[in-house]
Amino acid sequence: MNTANRYARCSISSRHDQGSLFRERSRAALTWRVTQPVAPGGSEKRLRTVVLLTVSAMLAQQPGVALADKGKSPGSLAPQSVGNLPAESTGRGIDEGGGSAWEAYAGVAAAATCFLSSPPEPDRLPLPGSPINQKVRYLSFTAGDPGRSQAIRVPFDYLPPPYTPWEGVLMWVGQPTEYCEQAGKERPPCPCGQPSCVFTGATLQCDPYFTDWSVFDVVHVFHEGILPSATYTVQVIDSTCTTVESNFSAPLFVTMSRWGDVVRNCVTCPCGPPDGVVGIPTDVTAVLDKYKNLEPPGAPCAAVSKTRADLDWETPNRRVDISDVTFCLDAFRDVHWPVAFGPPSPRPCSP
């Protein structure tokens, strides 16, 4: 044994015998706890290096766990909002005297408390086969674990021209709000029709919003960046986690229906999902029926939901009016969205 290793080994034995340092290994959490860390000098400095290297080896197989930067105090390791906490690297080096055993323990404990969220689920129609309730301008899903505070991330995967420069944008679902299902009214109090008086809507923002999403039924997300024929990823992260990729839920991939394609037909109740074709007796009529708030007993079944019929070109306005009927008619005439509406707004959430 060389002199340095023999000296470090003797230091550990000596300090342990004196009762000034002890270690405890939890078999359940597989973490190390070191109390009364010694000052970084002389034999104590060598001792701390040995302990840090031991803890570092334990962390090597745990993605997303890293030791804190050198010089931080234990108080600086308090839990932070996921929106403000940078992704950590597992490859941060430990030099002699850098960091502390307490910081290493805090890093392990933080990883151990990260709750892996359940993946979001698509909105489905109550029809044979449970088809996905695809929409033109609303991104719809259910998400959340009961009793957990979580946030929902929406990366923009593919957007049609002229919104292609927005590809790669990463946004978060904002605070959910109740909106009226009746065509001409946006916010409660809402006249009660069938099958529901209200729906839950939310827009997108640049910072995460944490809440218990499980208390809501289907969440319908609207934004200028939620576009026909576009594709998105929806993922959930718990408030106990940092924003490394391994801490997000499994993804839900969502593809929006084409411009003006609202239904297959309304022979069934509710009307069937989009079929890739825009027609007057199907799609245009479905939007017109929603504009008229068509409900039983004057009709065989209720008109399509507002989230299917609201087609406004920039940001859906949570209403269905004659402009939505006109937009659907334009789509039937092969007026491609959004050629007639000008360029998009500046790319959101830019640094």
Image (cartoon, rainbow, N blue to C red):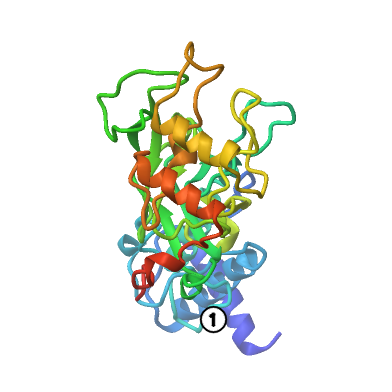
**Left or right of 325 in this view: 32:** right
Against 343, residue 141 (above or below) is above
Extreme residue in the top direction: 297
Residue 310's image quarter? top left
Image mark count: 1
Against 19, residue 305 (above or below) is above
**Residue 8 in the image, given as x and y percentages of width and height:** 57, 78
Locate the N terminus by quadrant. bottom right
Residue where numbered disc 1 is placed: 93
**Residue 219 in the image, given as x and y percentages of width and height:** 46, 39
Q: Residue at x 36, y 32 (%)?
A: 183
**Left or right of 2 in this view: 94:** left
Locate the C terminus by quadrant. bottom left
Against 179, residue 204 (above or below) is below
* Viewer-closest of 307 and 282: 282
* Viewer-closest of 336 and 111: 336
**Residue 242 in the image, given as x and y percentages of width and height:** 47, 59
